Image: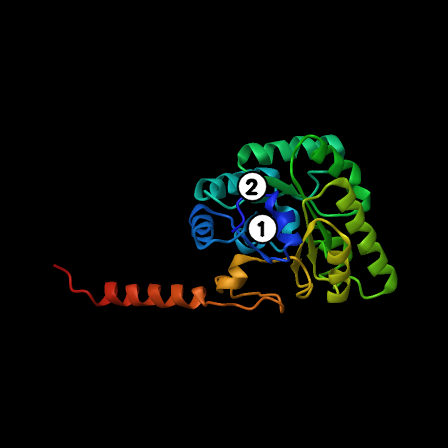
Amino acid sequence: MLTSLPDLRLKKQADERVTVLTAYDYPTARLLDEAGVDLLLVGDSLGMVVLGMPDTTGVTLDMMLHHTAAVRRGVKRAPIISDLPFHTYDTPEQALANARLLMAAGADAVKLEGGVPFIPQIRAIIEAGIPFVGHIGMLPQSVVVEGGYKKKGKTPAQAEQLLADALALDAAGACAIVLESMVPEVATEITRQVKATTIGIGAGSGTDAQVLVTPDLIGSFPWFRPPFAKAHADVASEIQRAVSEWMQGVKSELRD
């Protein structure tokens, strides 16, 4: 059972897999923590699966602070990673100031999207003593610019750039790196070459850890689910069943 971020390196050395799930509110965070999930991620995916936005680019820092604080109140054991949202880390100074705000709200580490171009921001965060998690591959905050969600690492040039990004993040001191939607062979090679724990999502089984968006896992967001995410429950249907049963009871109940 993981109880601190330094344990990540020990888990990698021992070839022990790590589990990561997203949490955006107190009850979900408490349930996941009590279930023994190793790491919790307050992801900017909340823009889509909680707030109904078309993508993550509309998520603000205030939203992330609000949800990070809620998750913190529900967690006693698992370290919490919080996302820096779109355009909140354009400069090293901005990245550090906003990372400090997330830590004050209850995060144990912060995450931002991007590789080599963001090393100055990443170094500013790490040199201030804030644990950092990287994120390379498919970057949800870039979906508007790129025109959709596209698998990464399909060409030798892409694979080479992903490896360069991962090695740069590793050298800067990232404790973990999310590898999202990339060719499995590339993710496996990155995992072999870096000391940081790799956290895969849609990147095959060769990473040190796996992360899923919790609504995808439990089936509470039925309107969209990525092809790599297998639902292990159907919470949406169960909610509708319970509501229907309650409404029928109310409508059929005789007045006093």
Q: Amino acid at mark 2?
A: Met
The residue indicated by pointer 1 is 47
Place of residue 208 in the rendered image (x, y in percent of width and height, measured from the top left): 65, 57
- Report the side of 253 relative to 182 (left or right): left
Which residue is found at the position 70% from the left and 35% from the top? 126
Mark 2–mark 1 contact, CB under 8 Å? yes
Residue 118 vs 234, above or below: the answer is above
Place of residue 10 in the rendered image (x, y in percent of width and height, measured from the top left): 63, 49
Which residue is found at the position 81% from the left and 45% from the top? 116
| Of residues 156 and 85, the one drawn nearer to the viewer in this rendering | 156
| Of residues 208 and 151, the one drawn nearer to the viewer in this rendering | 208
The residue indicated by pointer 2 is 63
Q: CA distance from mark 2 to mark 1?
A: 9 Å
Closer to the chain start, of discs 2 and 1, is 1
User: Which of the numbered marks, if any, corresponds to residue 110?
Assistant: none
Q: Secondary structure at mark 2?
A: helix
Asked whether residue 113 is in view, the answer is yes
Which residue is found at the position 56% from the left and 39% from the top? 107
| Of residues 158 and 139, the one drawn nearer to the viewer in this rendering | 158
